[in-house]
Amino acid sequence: MSKFPIIVFEGIEGSGKTTHINFVYKYFNKKNKKFIKFREPGGSKNSEKIRKILLNKNSNFNNKTDLLLMLGSRSENIEKIIKKNYKKKIIIIDRFIDSTIAYQHYGMGIDLKIIKSINHFLLNKISPDFTFLNIVNKKNMLTRLKKRKNLNRYDKFDYNFYSRVQKGFIKLASKNRNKYKIIDSNNEIKINKEIIFEKINRLLK
Ligand code: TMP
């Protein structure tokens, strides 16, 4: 493992992804680690512009347009953030290529080959070193979503959609177990925090 890996957090809405990333963010700050953290869609200035229109409640793009906007946002991040910091800093990403496969392929039915091919075109040899996949059951997911004050366009699918997406994520994780850790966010937060820190420390050894 590189001293400066790319570590990704994935998972459906309400899966605890953001809470878990924030633990790592604070931990790295405390330890004075050289790292950067960003989210997708979003991240670089241009990608945040794309995020705004993509997730706006009043937007009504078709699925293919969504795919291209997600990838457009990624393209900007690769050029503006990733290439600059690759192997120089730890890169933490809140969603990355697996989200595109899970949401646009398993959720929306877009051809997997097309997604993989554009991702490859954008990333070339760069790929995540390790992924934490956060999972959640139906009851907790719906309860957590209900508590959100501002729901965006992607917070409003029916549960079947999120269920397909989560199954897709799990499929990706099970294909390459040594590069993924599944974090069950139905469990106690404190326990998950320990599991994540333990794994992170092992990755950075
Ligand atoms: P979030 O930042 O609150 O997680 O919301 C971003 C939404 O965008 C989330 O529902 C997942 C979705 N998404 C995709 O559908 N495809 C992608 O490639 C990425 C990065 C995110």
Image: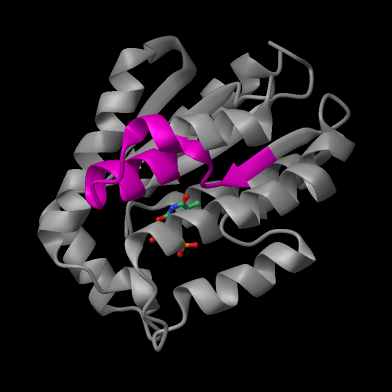
Give how far across and how far down residue 24 sits, in percent: 62, 43
Q: Quadrant of the N terminus?
A: top right
Any part of residue 191 in sight: no
Query: Is residue 101 on the magenta stretch?
Result: yes
Give how far across and how far down residue 52 sits, in percent: 58, 77
Q: Is residue 132 left or right of residue 93?
A: left
Q: Residue at x 32, y 52 (%)?
A: 12
Magenta region: 92-115
In-front residue for pair 130/66: 66
Q: Is residue 199 left or right of residue 2?
A: left
Q: Is residue 105 left or right of residue 28?
A: left
Q: Residue at x 74, y 40 (%)?
A: 28
Q: Is residue 91 left or right of residue 148?
A: right
Give how far across and how far down residue 109 sits, in percent: 23, 46
Q: Residue at x 32, y 15 (%)?
A: 175
Q: Residue at x 73, y 53 (%)?
A: 76
Identify the main secondary structure in magenta: helix
Location of residue 20 with respect to 133 vertically, above or below: below
In-front residue for pair 86/49: 49
Q: Quadrant of the C terminus?
A: top right
Query: Is residue 153 on the magenta stretch?
Result: no
Location of residue 31 with respect to 199 vertically, above or below: below
